[in-house]
Amino acid sequence: MKIAFNVTVFLLMCLAIAGCKKYDTDYKSFLDNHEVTYPGLAAGLNYHSGNLRAVLVWHPSPDPSIRRYVIKWNNGLDSLLLSAASHDPGDSVVVSIPNLQEYVYSFHIIAYDKDNHPSIGQDINNVRVYGPTYQSTLLNRAYNAANPYVTHSDGSVTLNFNKADTGNVATTIRYTNKLGTTTERSFVADSNSITLTDYKYGTDVTYRSSYKPVKDAVDTFNALSYDKFPTIIGTIEMDKSLFKAVYLPTDVGSAYGWELPFLWDKSTNEPGFHTPGTDFPIWFTIDLGQSASLTQLKLWQRMSALYDVGNAKRFEIWGTNSTPDPSGSFNGWTQLASFTSYKPSGLPRGQNSDEDKAFAAAGEPFNFPANGPTVRYIRFKILETWGGTNYFHAIEISVTKQLK
């Protein structure tokens, strides 16, 4: 019985082996008795977003039989053929796919060898393409509203901007130079200012910012239009050596040896100019020695009587470009501005904070309206002093003019 069982097992094993040998080559009928060849794969597949395009990048396959690559997208409805120019994995294949929509794409890359055998294919997914919708969201970089520009004694001007938004790469400034030619200059996002050395004062300045939607994007997008920068009024301090006192019949005189020319002796120490006691208002006249459109007056108080006694609280500045009427009248004069002195602390008379002292010591600035008339002579008309006195005193003045 045992012998019969062993014989049966042996016969069954032979039948199984025979059955395997019958089917082990059947797969060849599906391949038409040929081997399947798959070209080698590319490496380092990557992409860069662009403006209605995408740039695909990869390292070529080292397989020397590869002759071309086919890139497909839109579910295979669109494709692009690219010859295999290199088989060095150290090289990079870079191909731009144009005429795309603002959308997220997937690209399928297939390599073909000399016998037209395709590779299994490789995908680059989630490729974001940007366009008009993204561009419409871009804003020009904001300028520094508190201090938009600074002019310099050499005639140059520095434009100041706020911190750049994410994605900003540069801002282009368009302006007219001193030769009357439209010029463009740019500065990068890491900088908050740009200095123009050849700007023609009195002309418009516009600017436009550019962005990249992602850091490695291949294209830069500009904001849709230029914005106008605030009007730049170039200023420079006028030469005090040209200033002269003008003594007209109705002008107030001096007292205590504090003479009018001490107001421009380039010293903020006493003495300055001091008038005698008389009925208000009072006025005095200065020849600036040149004709100019004035931008700012600085007035230094008598610090020993800070915000008190004869220091000016309210006054007017009048101007003319013609020789003043010798009678001392205001015929031919134009009021340029009306000013009120400012005390930072707002404390009552006789009480001064450290801020008050520092503000006054630096010279209190009084700004004239922009683009005022050209004048050579100015007239101070004192209306009220901080102490309510019937006299006036001051230590020093400086005047800035508009650059042309």
Image (spheres, grey):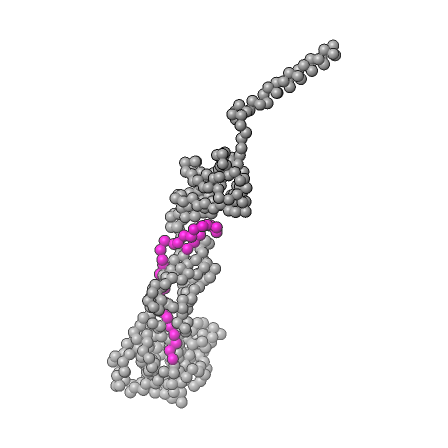
In front here: 371 or 37? 37
Quarter placement of the C terminus: bottom left
Examine the residues drawn in magenta and state their main secondary structure.
loop
Q: Quadrant of residue 398?
A: bottom left
In front here: 62 or 356? 62
The residue positioned farthest toward the top in the image shown: 1
In front here: 195 or 358? 195
Above or below, 272 against 92 in this view is below
Quarter placement of the N terminus: top right
Spot occupied by residue 308 in the image (x, y as percentages of width and height): 42, 79
Q: Is 116 situated left or right of 225 in this image? A: right
Magenta-tinted stretch: 210-239
Q: Residue at x 28, y 76 (%)?
A: 334
Q: Quadrant of residue 328?
A: bottom left
In front here: 348 or 225? 225
Inspect the magenta stretch and tell me whether residue 216 lies in it: yes
The residue positioned farthest toward the bottom in the image shown: 257
Q: Residue at x 36, y 87 (%)?
A: 254
Spot occupied by residue 360 in the image (x, y as percentages of width and height): 44, 76
Q: Is 335 situated left or right of 7 in this image? A: left
Inspect the magenta stretch and tell me whether residue 370 lies in it: no
Mark yes or no: residue 106 visible.
no
Above or below, 105 against 219 in this view is above
